[in-house]
Amino acid sequence: MYPLIKKILFAFNPETSHELSLDCLGALHRLKGLGLLAKPVADNPVQVMGLTFANPVGLAAGLDKNGDYFNALGELGFGFVEIGTVTPLAQPGNPKPRLFRLAEHNAIINRMGFNNKGVDHLVEQVKRRKFKGILGINIGKNAKTPVENALDDYRICMQKVYQYADYITVNVSSPNTPGLRNLQFGDSLTELLTGIKHEQTALAQSHQRYVPIAVKIAPDMDSDAVKEVADTLLTVGLDGVIATNTTVGREGVEDDPLHEQAGGLSGKPVRNKSTQVIKQLAAILEGRLPIIGVGGIDSGETAEEKIAAGASLVQVYSGFIYRGPVLIKECAEAIAKRN
Ligand SMILES: Cc1cc2nc3c(=O)[nH]c(=O)nc-3n(C[C@H](O)[C@H](O)[C@H](O)COP(=O)(O)O)c2cc1C
């Protein structure tokens, strides 16, 4: 069924087709017709960050930025769904066009720029949760907030979503918010993560519930920077790392007329870069912190590759756009076979 739907959807410009797909998904969900699109995924429970995931395959952040569709998306068989990136205030993101399909390369370039309806809207949506899997909420900073004040924005989001999230992701790796990725390095990283840990401790106390926090990093880091992130996460005592976000590199897609579009590249071309970062993290972390592997997963084999590199869970985005819900089952089965 998905190949036919994809043919129709891909006839539209990427952002229209994105919105249309999610609206159709929501409608099918309301009509209880999602069985047409997805086959049940067998349970293969895994414990990560103190949470039990029914299976280790999740939806990566950015597809459902506002939490408008996670109940429907969850029914496709994901063990977990990460919504966001959400910011304290609603913001429009970058001017359109800002989403490009490099179909020959099974890739996407996006410079959405955290377009979202703001954290208060997302909270209203998550209050209507029916999804029984794990719900992650990915948080960021508003474009207008100076990078020096980024912690304020993360804290506002943490305070608002804490009660509703199974885990929270701190996104410091989007290439489309100027200055954001500087938060991945040196004193800025230590200060930010220390502030976030303090907030987590206070919220855990006031809510009498510990919500784990993962940090999402870019694939464009040298090995020293990866080591710095891993060491800081351990020192500060955060709970996990998501590797990786999109890349600013264009290796392997130079022949595509769209390759010069600004933004983050995802899909097949980021696969190896992400896997390399996961391997480096795994070598340093030695199992002390879990890794969630994301970047270029488009088959059972590529999902399994992330687990072999050291990830405990995987997430998909671009591969899901190109392949549809069948990818979830394929990945879950390939990973289950390893056990
Ligand atoms: C259109 C688009 C929007 C995205 N938005 C976000 C976002 O808001 N927050 C985030 O952490 N990652 C975002 N991502 C990155 C994905 O979550 C994922 O880390 C990245 O695309 C690599 O995975 P993939 O190759 O399976 O797509 C976005 C990716 C795409 C393609």
Image (cartoon, rainbow, N blue to C red):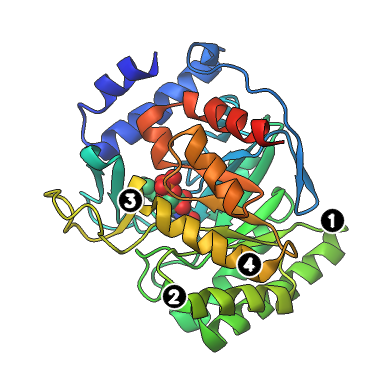
Name the residue tied to disc 4: 283
Residue pictured at 41% horizontal, 50% vertical: 271
Q: Say if residue 258 shows up in the picture.
A: yes
Viewer-side label of 1, 2: 2
Quick check: marks 4 and 1 in contact, CB under 8 Å? no
Quick check: marks 1 and 3 in contact, CB under 8 Å? no
Name the residue tied to disc 1: 209
Q: Which of marks 3 and 2 is nearer the N terminus?
A: 2
Q: Which of marks 4 and 3 is nearer the N terminus?
A: 3
Q: Distance between the Cα atoms at labels 4 and 1?
A: 31 Å
In the rendered image of this protein, does residue 129 appear above or below residue 169? above
- Tell whether 295 sits left or right of 56: left
Q: Distance between the Cα atoms at labels 2 and 4?
A: 14 Å
Residue pictured at 53% horizontal, 40% vertical: 303
Give the x, y percent position of residue 314: 58, 45
Query: Quadrant where the C terminus lies?
Result: top right
Considering depth in this image, is 201 or 50 the residue closer to the camera?
50
Q: Distance between the Cα atoms at labels 1 and 2?
A: 36 Å
Q: Which amino acid does label 4 sit on?
A: Ala
Q: Check mark 4 vs ligand 1: CB closer than 8 Å? yes or no.
A: no
Q: Check mark 2 vs ligand 1: CB closer than 8 Å? yes or no.
A: no
Name the residue tied to disc 2: 222
Give the x, y percent position of residue 309: 57, 54
Give the x, y percent position of residue 266: 36, 50
Q: What residue type is labelled 2?
A: Asp
Q: Earlier in the sequence, mark 1 or mark 2?
A: 1
In the rendered image of this protein, does residue 47 appear above or below residue 113? above
Q: Residues within 10 Å of mark 4 (few under 14, many from 20)?
A: some
Q: How crowded is mark 2: few (under 14 residues within 10 Å), some or many (20 or more)?
A: few
Q: Which amino acid does label 1 sit on?
A: Arg
**Residue 262 occupies which quadrant of the picture?**
bottom left
Q: Which mark is residue 269?
A: 3
